[in-house]
Amino acid sequence: MSTLKSATTVASLGTAQTLAWASTYYLPAILAAPMAKDLGVSTPTVFAAFSCALVVSALLGPRAGRAIDTLGGRPVLMATSVVFALGLSALAMAQGPWTLFVAWLLLGVGMGSGLYEAAFAALVHLHGKNARNQITGITLIAGFASTVGWPLSMWMESQWGWRGACWAWAALHLVVGLPLNAWTPRRTRVESPALPSTGADAAMPAPDPTPLHARRTTVLLAFVFAATWFTSTAMAAHLPRLLQEGGATLATAVAVGALVGPAQVAGRLLEFGFLRHVHPLLSARLAAMMHPVGAGLLAITGAPMAAVFAVFHGAGNGILTIAKGTLPLVLFGPAGYGHRQGLLMVPARIAQASSPWVFGIFLDRLGAGALWVSAGLGAAALLALLAVAPPADSGQGG
């Protein structure tokens, strides 16, 4: 595939991913309260419906990945645009708790087949083992989903109400998302072992086909992804309150929380620039270290280190988002990537669904001490990554 065509594919998929994340994952933060008030339910009920959608997405992920392995990303992502539009339309027409949950379950189908894992699988289907830069490119663009989505949802709600906002997002999936996903090339890739590789990829050994090695690596990666997604979602839901428990004022907590998004993008730029020249395992280990280090500084020093913690957490989370796409690729190879990616993300999606509630309990009982829970999970994820051996490793220790 030509460089121009590859860049166009990344731009179109990245923009479609921005729309997909902004209108699903980041939607409840703005619309949950007015939605709950109008439907006569509590705000936690809306978030419970959202959590159910995440569970559905976890269960559907492997099937969606297998479909992309077989058919390519284009038909699956195009169908997902329609599913998103249907789910948001159903949400706009919801009249009570049952229809609310049905709408979010339908959105869960779209999330399971139309968020990052599906886009990553589509790129691997096209580029094979050389998809690392394209995966990074998509996350760079879609990293602004909350930056774009939250103000836009707020503006839509102020103009047309929460139902009008849902109708508008549904329309955007049909008039913007569907054509963007339709630009995804059909499968034309033919594997060519004669093509030279450069940089860190040139030093990557062929994936080890040993079943025992594959099972061990799968378990370790599944744990890493679950632990880091639990922490990422917990911070997204509770960071301002956590910082206040640590001694920061509300104004400071909100200002510091705003640093996480730019830090995520900065981390992805670091991966795209410098870290792409090293093995993805090394960049993932460095990223996994960032949250525990930042959390330790915040727990020991208190509010003066709040901004440092936010930057460390955001940068590490940004790089780990890329690692979730690149590590399975370099450790297992491109064959069956979509299905394997879906399986690896099942525990992560379930952990993500439970995270706001579970971490909220820790926060209620431990206050700022809940930070040691996320730091411990981050340290455990780092240990798991240290235990992952590069494919065909002969004892060099990664």
Image (cartoon, rainbow, N blue to C red):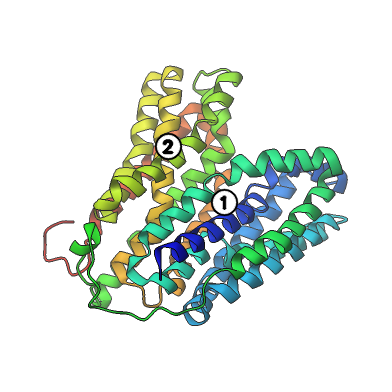
Please name whichever residue, 147 or 195, is drawn nearer the observer in this view of the structure. 195
Of the 4 image quadrants, the one containing the N terminus is: bottom left
Name the quadrant containing residue 101: bottom right
Q: Position of residue 104 (x, y in %)?
A: 72, 59
Mark 2, residues whose alpha carbon is within 10 Å: few (<14), some, or many (≥20)?
many
Q: 223 or 326: nearer the eye?
A: 326
Q: Position of residue 133 (x, y in %)?
A: 37, 57
Q: CA distance from mark 1 to mark 2?
A: 20 Å
**Residue 339 is at least partly visible in this image:** yes
Q: Identity of the amino acid at label 1?
A: Ser
The residue closer to the viewer here, 88 or 16, is: 16
Q: Nearer the viewer, residue 35 or 140?
A: 140
Sooner in the amino-acid sequence: mark 1 or mark 2: 2
Please tell me whether mark 1 sits on a helix, a strand or a loop. helix
Question: Residue at coordinates 76% horizontally, 65% vertically from top-left?
Answer: 86
Q: Which mark is residue 354?
A: 1
Is 74 situated left or right of 273 in this image?
right
- Labelled pair 1, 2 in contact (Cβ < 8 Å): no
Q: What amino acid does circle 2 point to?
A: His
Is 222 situated left or right of 388 in this image? right
Q: Residue at x 33, y 69 (%)?
A: 129
**Secondary structure under badge 2?**
helix
How many numbered marks does the figure carry?
2
Query: Which residue is depicted at the point 18% across and 62% down?
Result: 203
Left or right: 89 in relation to 73:
right
> Which quadrant holds the C terminus?
bottom left
Residue 378: x and y in percent read: 37, 43
Q: Is residue 98 above or below residue 182?
A: above
Check residue 313 in the rendering and tell me which mark sits there, or answer none.
Answer: 2
Q: Does residue 258 appear to the left or right of 194 in the view shown? A: right
Whether 237 is drawn above or below 338: the answer is: above
In the rendered image, is residue 357 in sight?
A: no
